[in-house]
Image (tube, grey):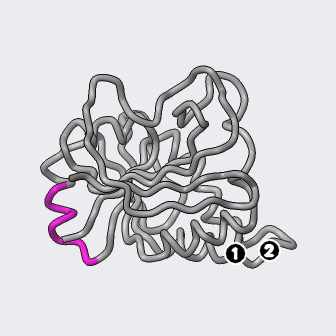
């Protein structure tokens, strides 16, 4: 059975989206990006909401931009190789290969997908992840914590949810970013 992983860059105060501006520095570092490439290369399916898909679809054509460094080209290849499911009531079509739209998030369908998958899945974006967390579907949490406190926005973890997690991995990067990997107990 495959795992469902929720992973995002977060601010030091726990926001996956800042109310104003970005989440701070550290994630755009080559060392971090190479680590992310290696970590998520085995992922077989990405679960996205519309807004996250619209951000990530950049990787469908990133390889065509001139002078891309090798770590960017590798991430583009890895992203293109994976299946993508976009949960949206408003998106009319997709502009990437291996991508389909689902109109509603069905926890039972995701459970079945996990049970049948040969490779892990990720859920990306705090809104969609909140639904997966609420349904008890998320097996691991990967946080990439920047050095900035942003004071507001969308939290990485949804309000009203209690999780008791086990730390199973961590790494500090030269940029100051911290990676922490937790799994459900």
Which percent across, then down, holds residue 59? 62, 62
Q: Which residue is mark 2?
A: 69
Mark 2 Cα shell of 10 Å, populated few (<14), some (14-19), many (≥20)? few
The image shows a total of numbered marks equal to 2
Secondary structure under the numbered disc 2 in the rendered image: loop
Q: Cβ–Cβ below 8 Å for labels 2 and 1?
A: yes
* Numbered mark located on residue 73 in the image: 1
- Is residue 129 among the parts visible in the rendering? yes
Is residue 123 or residue 182 the one in the foreground? 182
Residue at image position (27%, 30%) is 161
**Residue 115 lies within the magenta run:** yes
Over which residues does the magenta segment extend? 111-118
- Magenta region, mostly helix, strand or loop? helix
Is residue 157 or residue 131 the one in the foreground? 157
Residue at image position (18%, 71%) is 1
* Numbered mark located on residue 15 in the image: none
Residue at image position (75%, 45%) is 25
**Residue 31 lies within the magenta run:** no
Which percent across, then down, holds residue 109? 16, 53
């Amino acid at each position: 059975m495959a795992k469902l992983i929720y992973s995002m860059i977060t601010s030091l105060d726990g926001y996956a989206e800042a109310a104003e501006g970005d989440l701070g520095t550290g994630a755009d570092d080559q060392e971090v990006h190479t680590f992310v490439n290696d970590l998520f290369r085995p992922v077989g399916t990405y679960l996205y909401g519309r807004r996250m898909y619209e951000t990530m679809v950049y990787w469908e054509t990133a390889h065509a931009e001139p002078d891309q460094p090798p770590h960017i080209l590798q991430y583009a290849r890895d992203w293109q190789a994976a299946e993508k499911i976009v949960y949206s009531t408003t998106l009319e079509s997709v502009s990437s290969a291996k991508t389909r739209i689902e109109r509603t998030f069905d926890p039972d369908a995701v459970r079945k997908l996990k049970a049948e998958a040969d490779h892990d899945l990720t859920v990306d974006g705090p809104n969609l992840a909140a639904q997966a967390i609420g349904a008890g579907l998320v097996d691991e949490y990967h946080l990439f914590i920047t050095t900035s406190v942003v004071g507001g926005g969308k939290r990485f973890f949804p309000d009203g949810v209690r999780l008791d997690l086990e730390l199973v991995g961590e790494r500090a990067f030269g940029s100051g970013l911290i990676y922490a990997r937790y799994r459900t107990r």
